[in-house]
Amino acid sequence: IAGITQAPTSQILAAGRRMTLRCTQDMRHNAMYWYRQDLGLGLRLIHYSNTAGTTGKGEVPDGYSVSRANTDDFPLTLASAVPSQTSVYFCASSAGTNTEAFFGQGTRLTVV
Amino acid sequence: GQNIDQPTEMTATEGAIVQINCTYQTSGFNGLFWYQQHAGEAPTFLSYNVLDGLEEKGRFSSFLSRSKGYSYLLLKELQMKDSASYLCAVMDSNYQLIWGAGTKLIIKP
């Protein structure tokens, strides 16, 4: 059972470059989320999707975009990376809006 | 604004009991979650409380008081593997999770 998979695991990216973080789940969960986790701060929601075909903005959406073409995939794109986007990014999914979330293993992104 | 407060770090002894507190101020309430996160790993679900009272699950218990905006996670018979960060998260009226910064728990032999 794979659960939820993120790729890549880590990446060093030059500022100004475009980057897509991949996220795939095989649990047929409706809801999916992208968070960033920075030292000393709680997880912060970037974007979310309550069901395939719909997306919404979270707490810190600027500089990021998402799409949800199908149930399984929820890619996160940084159009033009900046050093402040250096963080650990977690993708998560849940069966519903008030059920437990399952997290991917995270992507450690460094923008230089 | 919305706010979740929990201690930054706690230390406890192997075999002992520790209580990690979480206070919250959010726009609405649709449940409170506790997650465990080992260093360098993803958070994993521990418990969910939506009604007042104590929920027990093995060595871990979670308590909620909605009137006080307060929860705690109780860990009994501490083991070295319990060394991790414990994250408190509240689901607000829009069904969005608001996360605390986490409590790093250090277990000493």
Image (cartoon, coloured by chain):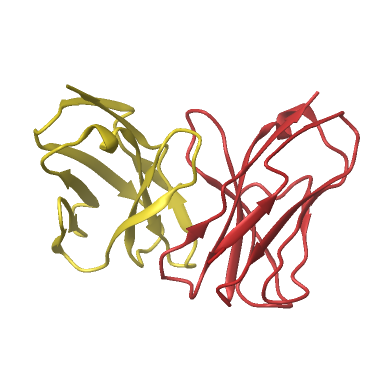
Chain colours: A red, B yellow
Relative side of A98 to A70, left or right: left
Against A69, residue A23 (above or below) is: above
Corner quadrant of residue A65: bottom right
Could you tell me which quadrant the C terminus of chain A lies in?
A: top right
Relative side of B49 to B97, left or right: left
Locate residue B62, reporting x and y percent: 19, 54
Relative side of A20 to B52, left or right: right
Locate residue A22, reporting x and y percent: 74, 55
Locate residue B5, reporting x and y percent: 33, 38
- The one nearer the camera, B11 or B96, is B11
Residue at image coords 79%, 45%:
A63
Relative side of A6 to B32, left or right: right
Residue B26 in view in this figure: no
- Residue sitting farthest toward the front: A1
Residue at image coords 47%, 28%:
A40
Against A24, residue A22 (above or below) is: above
Against A110, residue A97 (above or below) is: below
Residue at image coords 15%, 56%:
B58
Residue A46 in view in this figure: yes
Residue at image coords 75%, 46%:
A62
